[in-house]
Image (cartoon, rainbow, N blue to C red):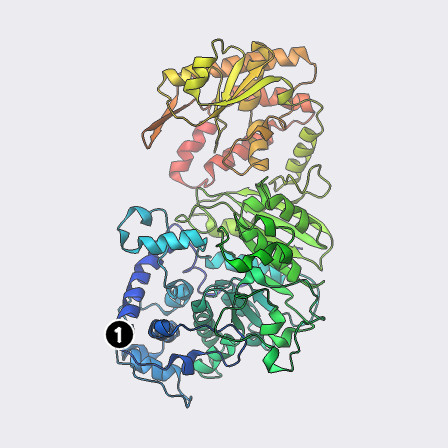
Amino acid sequence: MTPPKLTAPDWVAYSSPSHNNPLVPRVERLGRIVRAAAADIETVISVPFRDLYAPSRTGLGFTLDTSDESRRAAWALIGEWLVAASVGASCVAEGLGSVHNWFWSGSDRELGTVPELAIALDSDNAVELRALMPYLLDPMAAATRRDLLRAQSTAEERRARKASGVYYTPGDVAQLMVERVLSAGESTRQHLWLDPAHGSGVFLRAVLSAISGQPRARDRIYGVDLDPFAAESASFVLTAEDLVLNPEGPAPWDRWHRFRRNFATGDGLLIDTTLTPTQPTFDFDQQPNRPQDGHPLGSSGPWRLESAFPEIAGNGFSRVVANPPYAALQPADVNFHIPYLHPVTGLGAKQDISAVFAELCSNLLPSDGAMAIVLPLSVVSSTRAPFPELREHLSKQPGWLELLSFDRVPDALFGDDIKTRNAIVHLDKAASARFTVSPLYRWTSRTRQAALGNIPVTSVDGLDGVPQTIPKIGFDWERELFTACASQPRRLDNWQTRRQLLPLERATSVILDDSDVLALAPTAYNFLGVVREPYRAVTEGHDSQSSFSILRFDSDLHASAAYALLSSRLAFWIWHVTGDGFHVTNALHRRIPAPNGDTVRLGRLAELGDKLWKAALPSPVVSTNRGSTTVAFPTWTHTDLIDEIDSEVGASIGVDYAARLAAWHKQLVVVDLDSERRNMIGKKTS
């Protein structure tokens, strides 16, 4: 079922990276002002934080270090100011004290002392401020590769963000994922939504925007996060959104507390899902049996969501969205529980906890539940634990499983400043059983908006090797080609006699006769780095110590034919749809089909391979990085010879794929057909 297209909230454009809107640098610029303002506010206020901002019910893991109270109060006042500014309240012009009074209007609480300070954000655009609220209400500086090369004033915070694996989720990604989940199932019951790593509320804001017209929308949004700041920040973000969506209604503070009572401070990795929601482990009618505040939930052992939110007992969360941390597990004695709580991925949590969150989310869902979670691309491509185990686990869930894969360049899912390859996992347990995937998708910052709304998908049900190997394809012809390649009796590795991993310099010194060898670079992007005569690269200045695959073949005839095969668009396509979009592993040689006993075709391929190598030799590409020089001999511009090779291979496997793969490769390399610069590149592929 195609997800319904939601009307994009007005904040999506401002919170989504694009050619004219580099999100993270803009957040960092405004964030510096906000962090400086918070530091100044902290020194001049006297606010009873616990009386004002503690949640209105106990058992949520509310944690407040006395030494941190003034800092938390300062950030709460920043949150109030951003709420007022994002809804255009006139009190903003008067100062922070007036905003504080406006926010708590109608409350009988003691408000403390807040002077009329001004916050000098250089933006008077209310929609922009509301769009950026989740990112500005984050005490840590933004983390980008570029910023690490700049002034070191926030370097420690940047390193902390990178170590914790927490990155900003753009608004359009949150919108896309909520759309996927909203389309799930046919149930008419009022679903409860959960984000088990909610941060400052990017996903939950998208949820509120999508369901605001439904009954009791405010009461159906829940979150868990280990950071004590997160519950407060997310409550401000949702309050601002709710004031815009429903201007008539309770005062800001009343709305804030209504959201706050549904946010727990706790360790999501220690949530216990081993019992069904109809078998609670706590007596919810007895307050003493509920967890005590003062420490995050999970500090002393596993905990149940029903213990924090008694009202969900018997129902559970049927809608889950998340962008969990991409990081190694931090050492703690209590973490010995994780492999028992999450038996599929728990043993691999030391390296990456994101997979554990994916298992958690899937296990939280009832029979009509649905989730969307964004993860590293490892969930689709990695052969290292716990990701193959996670793929197996997800594929065995009832309903519809969809994996959308995203490349890191030209643009990335989280924006051009945060270069990661990602996947969105969508599971709808109530849907008919099917398994769909997308290509390893690319776009430019100019085409992002259109690209995210038109991701191609196709079924991989019944394909050999799935789910351990998941081809990243989006069209029926790709499925047919993948099936044809998999059915061939011989592979390129059948021609090999030996494979060594050596730097090219060393390879040329130990291999005296390289007529029956070729070298394959360890990484790739738009073409596979194949060298027919390794000494040629060294002669041109290659001195990188990265190890190439040195492949020796039965004869120089087989080596030349292998060079043709590895230079074909088919070989590149197989690498692209089965790998991680960067590394070239030995698995590739076992997947490329080779002619089966056809000596005539072998001879033709060898002849074409020799011609292609001679054509590539005069145009080496020399690049230097950190004092290391790499030499490559790209062949993808020699389209006539590549066309002939593809025709030969296509005839061998019985599929005439040449024209389709030529168009596919051009689209992959060019991406943005309307870009003048890319049109120049595109001419080389024609």
Residue 226 x, y percent position in the rendering: 49, 64
Above or below 32: residue 646: above
Q: Which residue is drawn at 51% across and 17% down?
A: 518
Q: Can residue 483 be seen in this view?
A: yes
Which of the two residues, 463 or 523, is positioned nearer the viewer here? 523
> Percent position (x, y) of residue 156?
33, 54
Q: Tell me if I can see residue 72 in this picture.
A: no
Q: Nearer the viewer, residue 335 or 56?
A: 335
Residue 132 left/right relative to 337: left
79 displayed left or right of 520: left
**Residue 521 falls left or right of residue 382:** left
Task: State the residue position of label 1.
Answer: 43
Closer to us: 192 or 514: 514
Q: In which quarter of the image is residue 539?
A: top left
Q: Quadrant of residue 176?
A: bottom right
Q: Where is residue 517 drawn, in percent x and y?
A: 52, 15
The mark tally for this picture is 1
Q: Where is residue 664 in the image (x, y as percent from the top left)?
A: 55, 34
At x 26%, y 80%, the residue is 116
Q: In which quarter of the image is residue 16?
A: bottom left
